Image: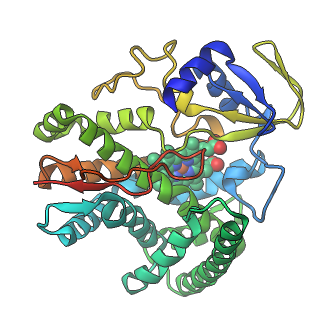
């Protein structure tokens, strides 16, 4: 998709797509503006499928809820997870064994964030398998582009969501009686000006963590592995000097952003680069294009492992800035350090079929089989 963004940026930086019935915005400056200006661009969507969801809230409700969950989701709370993330990473990679082959996604990049979030929420280890099946179902793409296929997956997903919600409601009851050191207990305790979260808000938020944190982190890790296999010299360089991992993670985020384009609804008429965006119109902010804008990044199509500064927009901007960014960064850092320490000559498996995942707003591949020494 990336060369196309270049052309679009130059020829029609703000354009209306009749087929999709929305505006597309491609320049860094404009994407930054759309995300920052929540007074003009709302996150509340026209189709409120179901729930009270932080990501889909506007102020003032957004601020109240965000302040509350911030109390549970502090950078320190996340940093304290480092040893546990290392342990989980090591367990997963131990299981891969010595065969010299693995499926990067199924064996590693998918289970890692699921287990971390399960832990964070307070799901006991013996229930992990159950939990993983639910969350896999929830993020499952539809392989065949047929109405029956969509209907079947949707039915499965509705059922999985209900079961998961019931399960989390039980965990919540247990934590109410006996708090642990986990997010669920912290959310039960959090209060601002005497206001607490309702049970239903805690459950919705927990489900949001799964929806927002799993596929994105899976894609971040896999997209990084793709780059390492595409650039063997880079792989050697980073393996020799693991201190490069943090800036490498930032560059992976910029170069292959797992979320390509958050969207908004215009709250009033807005003029952007001479185009009139009308109140109620949908606006798609192409972060993936902004991250390659040469007005902001020098040599934007090159992967520069120690790029500084690197103000990519991959975690969004403004009030909805990704709550899980410190967690995603930490998981990716630990994952790459461990992968590069254990495995040498990571390579994509010969003749492997590499397909992009379905959802156009995400950027990842379905499976990534690799070989290593
Ligand atoms: C919001 C990206 C990982 C939880 C966002 C937004 C983006 C994003 C772009 C803002 C969307 C918008 O403005 O409409 C990513 C990427 C990730 C990642 C690229 C991984 C590489 C995570 C993780 C978690 C998480 C691991 C939690 C465990 C959230 C939440 C919000 C959010 C709760 C909503 C914040 C709000 O609306 O105030 N994320 N995310 N994300 N993310 Fe992430």
The reply, left or right, for residue 25 in relation to residue 131 is right
**Compared to 346, does 204 lie above or below?**
below
Depth order, front residue of 179/234: 234
Image quarter where the C terminus lies is bottom left
Depth order, front residue of 354/68: 354
The reply, left or right, for residue 221 in relation to residue 196 is left
Position of residue 133 measured from the top left corner of the image (x, y, whole percent): 49, 77
The reply, left or right, for residue 327 in relation to residue 97 is right
Residue drawn at the location 68% of the way across and 63% of the way down: 146
Would residue 36 be seen by someone viewing this image from the given angle? yes
Would residue 323 be seen by someone viewing this image from the given angle? no
The reply, left or right, for residue 46 in relation to residue 73 is right
Image quadrant assignment for residue 249: top left
Image quadrant assignment for residue 21: top right
**Compared to 309, does 113 lie above or below?**
below
Position of residue 369 measured from the top left corner of the image (x, y, whole percent): 29, 57
Depth order, front residue of 184/211: 211
Residue drawn at the location 28% of the way across and 29% of the way down: 305
């Amino acid at each position: 998709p990336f060369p196309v963004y270049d052309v679009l940026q130059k020829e029609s930086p703000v354009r209306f797509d009749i087929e999709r019935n929305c505006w597309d915005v491609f320049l860094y400056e404009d994407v930054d503006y759309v995300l920052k200006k929540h007074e003009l661009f709302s996150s509340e969507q026209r189709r409120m499928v179901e729930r009270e969801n932080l990501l889909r809230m506007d102020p003032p409700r957004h601020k109240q809820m965000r302040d509350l969950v911030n109390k549970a989701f502090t950078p320190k709370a996340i940093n304290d997870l480092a040893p546990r993330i290392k342990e989980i990473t090591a367990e997963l990679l131990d299981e891969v064994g010595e065969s010299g082959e693995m499926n990067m996604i199924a064996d590693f990049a998918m289970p890692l964030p699921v287990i971390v979030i399960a832990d964070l929420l307070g799901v006991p280890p013996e229930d992990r398998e159950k939990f993983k099946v639910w969350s896999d179902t929830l993020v499952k793409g539809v392989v065949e582009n047929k109405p029956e296929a969509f209907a079947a997956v949707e039915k499965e997903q509705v059922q999985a969501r209900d079961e998961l919600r019931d399960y989390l409601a039980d965990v919540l009851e247990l934590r109410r009686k006996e708090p642990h050191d986990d997010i669920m207990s912290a959310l039960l305790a959090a209060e601002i000006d005497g206001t607490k979260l309702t049970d239903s808000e805690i459950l919705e938020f927990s489900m949001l963590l799964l929806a927002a944190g799993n596929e994105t982190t899976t894609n971040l890790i896999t997209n990084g592995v793709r780059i390492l296999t595409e650039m063997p010299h880079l792989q050697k360089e980073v393996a020799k000097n693991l201190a490069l991992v943090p800036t490498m993670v930032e560059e992976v985020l910029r170069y292959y952003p797992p979320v390509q384009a958050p969207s908004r609804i215009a709250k009033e008429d807005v003029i952007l680069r001479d185009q009139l965006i009308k109140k109620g119109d949908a606006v798609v902010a192409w972060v993936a294009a902004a991250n390659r804008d040469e007005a902001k990044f020098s040599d934007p199509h090159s992967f520069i492992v120690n790029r500084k500064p690197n103000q990519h927009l991959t975690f969004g901007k403004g009030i909805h800035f990704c709550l899980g960014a410190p967690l995603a960064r930490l998981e990716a850092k630990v994952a790459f350090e461990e992968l590069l320490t254990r495995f040498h000559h990571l390579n994509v498996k010969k003749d492997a079929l590499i397909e992009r995942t379905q959802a156009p707003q995400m950027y990842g591949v379905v499976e990534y089989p690799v070989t290593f020494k």
